[in-house]
Amino acid sequence: MSAAIPQILKQPRLRRALELTLGPALLILVWWIAFAGELVNKDLLPSPFATIADTAVAIANGEMIHDFIQTLIRVGYSIAIATVLGVPMGIALGAKDSVYRSLEFVIDFFRSTPATAMFPLFLLLFGLGDVAKIAIAAFAAWLVIVFNVAYGVMNARQTRILAAKSMGASNMRIFRDVIFFETLPQTFVGLRNAVSIALVVIIVAEMFIGAVDGMGHRIIDAQISYQLTDMYGSILAAGGMGYGLNLALLIVEKTIVHWSGK
């Protein structure tokens, strides 16, 4: 038996499957130890297995799926808006150092300001509906995308740019064939960070800004009604959403930017 384990680890697919399941298994183990050993009050921490069972029921009857989809839609809208507005702005800022230096303070100031501190302003501008939630998440994600795209443009490899210039390429050709592709790795870094920030902002907004659905609303509603397995299960589902979105972007990045670092 002990001799078979190294042979299993040598198989790439099985080894990858073990690597993927190790993290969740450790989380459940630590959770169960805390529950069984009463390291945390049992009235505040349900069993992980009871939580998983209740979450499976909520998914099967469609209750959690509805909230999950509503949150995912809001995040999707906010990221789409932030990308459409942020990528061109980042390119424009990064193309000219003087322009970026002139606006650097404004960008860094708002990027460093907690998005939740902007809730009152966006509520005044857009009201209590979904527009306010999407707008503030898009704004927070937009700042991250702008900063990363601008950074990517400014740090494009000068050797490739000089090589293109020496071959007589025009500025537009250099941007299209060199700078744009050099910027893509940093752009995807910005997109992954933007997705995480947008999800956090949307969840918090759903908790406190007049939401009737979504994972944030579900979490705070379960907490108020003391349905702890539903609360913990919703938190796990929200975390799974963030992990899934990040994984999806990583797959897209590896497909599009397969030459990165070469």
Image (tube, rainbow, N blue to C red):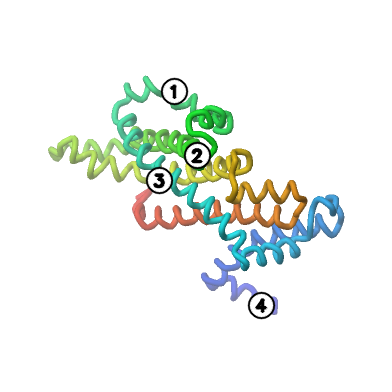
Q: Amino acid at mark 1?
A: Val
Number of numbered callouts drawn = 4
Task: Give the vertical position of 54 relative to 43 (above or below).
Answer: below
Q: Amino acid at mark 3?
A: Ala
Q: Residue at x 65, y 63 (%)?
A: 58
Q: Nearer the viewer, mark 3 or mark 4?
A: 3
Q: Nearer the viewer, mark 1 or mark 3?
A: 3
User: Which is nearer the eye, 205 or 42?
Assistant: 205
- How far separated are the C-alphas under marks 2 and 3? 11 Å
Q: Earlier in the sequence, mark 2 or mark 3?
A: 3
Residue where numbered disc 3 is placed: 80
Residue where numbered disc 4 is placed: 3
Indicate the position of residue 132 as horizontal and vertical percent values.
50, 37
Residue contact at pointers 3 and 4, CB within 8 angstroms: no
Residue contact at pointers 4 and 2, CB within 8 angstroms: no
Q: Residues within 10 Å of mark 2 (few under 14, many from 20)?
A: many
Residue where numbered disc 2 is placed: 137
Q: Residues within 10 Å of mark 1 (few under 14, many from 20)?
A: few
Q: Amino acid at mark 2?
A: Ala
- How far separated are the C-alphas under marks 3 and 4? 51 Å
Most distant residue in the left direction = 168
Which quadrant of the figure contains the N terminus?
bottom right
Q: Secondary structure at mark 2?
A: helix
Q: Is residue 57 left or right of residue 225?
A: left
Tell me where residue 117 sits by quadrant: top right
Q: Earlier in the sequence, mark 4 or mark 2?
A: 4
Q: Secondary structure at mark 1?
A: helix
